[in-house]
Amino acid sequence: MIQGLLGIEDLPREEIEAILDRAKDFQPVGDGSFAQFDRLRGKTVVLLFLEPSTRTRTSFEIATRRLGGDAILISGAGSSLSKGESLVDTLNTLAAMRPDAIVMRHKASGAPHFLARHLRTPIINAGDGTHEHPTQALLDARTILDRKRSLEGLRVAIIGDIEHSRVARSNVYLLSKFGVDIVLCGPAPLVPPELAGIAPGVSIEYDMRKAIRGCDVIMMLRVQLERQHEPDFPRGEYFSFYGLAPEHIELARPDVLVMHPGPINRGREISSEVADSQRSVILNQVENGVAVRMAVLERVLG
Ligand code: NCD
């Protein structure tokens, strides 16, 4: 049992391994069907999503139901937050109804950590600002491990808007605990040199072709326009320097995996040819999102 899940940075490696192992039991079996589980019978999970989400929200909802629990969705626009209620008051109100866990997404980095100190209800972070997105890193690791023997010694390039990406941070923390060689790449304003110091094994490279050479995994990221104050990069110009095109794939290892947490912006950070190619595991990531979130919910509530 763990008390909620706020991030990967402080999650021990053994805990990560236990979640990734258990997630395998929740993947579909040969004929595409799912084994039946009842571990959350009688349990209620509140999903408080105060930023847009398709994959994360839906997969937490499906994960809760597949384990026999009830999921209640609350979004910012439909809640009393839009009537001026503070986040702490909203959370106290929800906690007073005694849900068994609260899954939350919020635009402020640290919001779930702050609330976890005030509430006894376990909190699962579904993305806090530019800080962490722990279940995304776990599902990414599961997706890599479904295809590679181990994480140790792999070379992974993470390309795009690293500065504003909670997906990049959680992945760096996780991959670094497993001895992965991590290359961060993107336009200089979105990849400040200090990021090399956030975990062991991280280097920075501004030339995309160099970053990709010899890679086992390429993770592409969306430019997080909603978190930036600077003017946008022109779409075509961004793509010509940091968009993933078929010619890049030839520089990587022949069995390279192309990943993206979604939502993808075709023609901006990734070409359709690559996103829809045999090397792309983008939809496998989505599929594993359900299995990994089932493993996390079971560990927090089971
Ligand atoms: C990401 C997020 O919200 O952090 N999406 C996701 O959860 N799959 C990445 C993004 O929005 O670009």
Image (tube, rainbow, N blue to C red):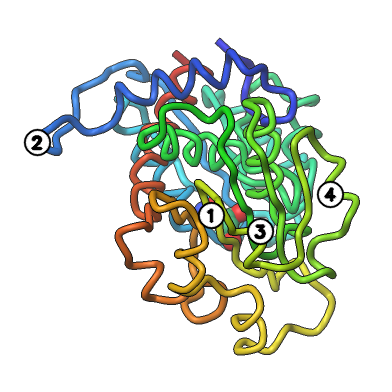
Which quadrant holds the C terminus? top left
- Three-letter amino acid code at the position of disc 4: Leu
Residue at image point 49% right, 68% down: 264
Quarter holding the N terminus? top right
| Image x and y of residue 94, in percent | 61, 35
Disc 4 versus disc 3: nearer the observer:
3
Which of the two labelled residues, at mark 4 and mark 2, occupies the earlier sequence position? 2
**Residue 257 image offset from top left, x and y in percent:** 43, 51
Q: Residue at x 90, y 50 (%)?
A: 194
Q: Position of residue 215 (x, y in %)?
A: 55, 50
Vertically, is 232 above or below 256? below
Between residues 175 and 297, which one lies in front from this camera angle? 175
Going from N to C along the chain, the mark reached first, 4 or 1, is 4
Which one is in front, 134 or 119? 134
The CA span between labels 4 and 3 is 15 Å
The numbered disc on residue 218 is 1
Q: Nearer the viewer, mark 1 or mark 3?
A: 3
Which of pointers 1 and 2 lies earlier in the amino acid sequence? 2
Q: Quadrant of residue 184?
A: bottom right
> Viewer-nearest of labels 1 and 2?
1
Please name the amino acid that badge 1 sits on. Answer: Ile
Residue at label 3?
211
Q: Earlier in the sequence, mark 1 or mark 3?
A: 3
| Disc sitting over residue 160 in the figure | none
Residue occupied by mark 2: 31
